[in-house]
Every structure is written in structure tokens, then in C-alpha cells.
């Protein structure tokens, strides 16, 4: 069982630059980016601290690294999925991520509840 967060942005330097330009011009948004690193490529301290305190083993990937089944399950991005290849389900959708984009601890607490529900 995996927990995978998918950013609404492509990886690599060109993907990051394209996302930054689109964000500044209002053409794109990624609440998961805001939550985990914002403009800091090393990540937000609040995110790092919340991850250390959490039992959720979240893996973060860019949309160009997601599998077809992950993208199909996610619908709109960003999203956080729980499951394995072929059995993904949404644990946090775009709206929830956006509402918790400034609350890393609250976001991870939500995921812990979702993860516990799947793993018994």
C-alpha cells in the first residue's frame, strides 16, 4: 500500500520554470506545491516538520512521472492517492489540498486517517 501525491506540474528544470511562469500569470495552480515547498526548492520547514511527526510514508511525484492508472484515478491535479498500481483511490483531491495548503500537519493528519482506514 502506497501513498502518492501528484503535483500539478512537470518535473525537471523546464517543468519547474514553466509552472513558476504559469503560477505568476495565473494560468496554473498547485496546492500540493504550495503545501510542500512553495517557492523554496528545498521545501518548507513546516512541511518537513509535519512529515517527521507523521506516520504517513508519502511519496511525491510530478505529473509527468505518474502512471496512466494514477492519472486516471486522480482526475484533476494535484491529488493524493492511496493504493497500488491498478487499485488507486483518491485520499485527497484538489479541493481538499487547496483548503489545507497552509496546514501541513492537518493535511497529514487527514492522510493518516485515510491510510489507517485502508490498512486496518
Image (spheres, helix red, strand yellow):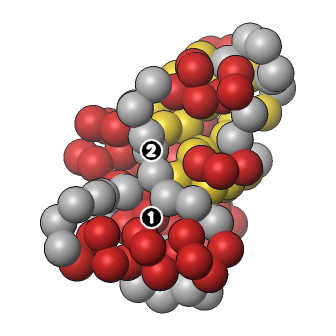
Total number of numbered discs in the rendering: 2
Q: What element carries label 1?
A: helix
Q: Which residue lies furthest to the left in this view?
A: 26
Task: Residue 33: give its label.
Answer: 1
Please tell me which residue is depicted at 57% across the width and 19% down the height of the picture. 73
Quarter that holds the N terminus? top right
Please tell me which residue is depicted at 56% across the width and 85% down the height of the picture. 41
Q: Name the residue under label 2.
A: 78
Please tell me which residue is depicted at 67% across the width and 74% down the height of the picture. 12
* x and y percentages locating residue 4 in the rendered image: 67, 41
Residue density around tag 1, few if under 14, some if 14–19, many if 20 or more, within 10 Å: many
Quarter that holds the C terminus? top right
* Up-down relation of residue 17 to residue 32 (above or below): below
* x and y percentages locating residue 79 in the rendered image: 48, 38
Residue density around tag 2, few if under 14, some if 14–19, many if 20 or more, within 10 Å: many
* Up-down relation of residue 92 to residue 29 (above or below): above
* Up-down relation of residue 68 to residue 18 (above or below): above
Residue 54 placement, left or right of 43: right
Check whether the beta carbons of the residues at disc 1 and disc 2 lie within 8 A of each other. Answer: yes
Q: Is mark 2 on a helix, strand or loop?
A: loop
* x and y percentages locating residue 92 in the rendered image: 45, 33
Please tell me which residue is depicted at 78% across the width and 13% down the height of the picture. 86
Residue 50 visible? The answer is no
Residue 66 visible? The answer is yes
Q: Distance between the residues labelled 1 and 2?
A: 9 Å
Mark closer to the chain start, 1 or 2:
1
* Up-down relation of residue 60 to residue 116 (above or below): below
* x and y percentages locating residue 27 in the rendered image: 22, 60
Amino acid at each position: 500500500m502506497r501513498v502518492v501525491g501528484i503535483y500539478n506540474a512537470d518535473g525537471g528544470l523546464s517543468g519547474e520554470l514553466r509552472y513558476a511562469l504559469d503560477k505568476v500569470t495565473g494560468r496554473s495552480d498547485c496546492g500540493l506545491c504550495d503545501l510542500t515547498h512553495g517557492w523554496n526548492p528545498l521545501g518548507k520547514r513546516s512541511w518537513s516538520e509535519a512529515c517527521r511527526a507523521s506516520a504517513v510514508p508519502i511519496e511525491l511525484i510530478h505529473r509527468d512521472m505518474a502512471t496512466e492508472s494514477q492519472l486516471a484515478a486522480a482526475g484533476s491535479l494535484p491529488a493524493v492517492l492511496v493504493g497500488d498500481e491498478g487499485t488507486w483511490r483518491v485520499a485527497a483531491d484538489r479541493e481538499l489540498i487547496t483548503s489545507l495548503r497552509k496546514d501541513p500537519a492537518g493535511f497529514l493528519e487527514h492522510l493518516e486517517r485515510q491510510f489507517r482506514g485502508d490498512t486496518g
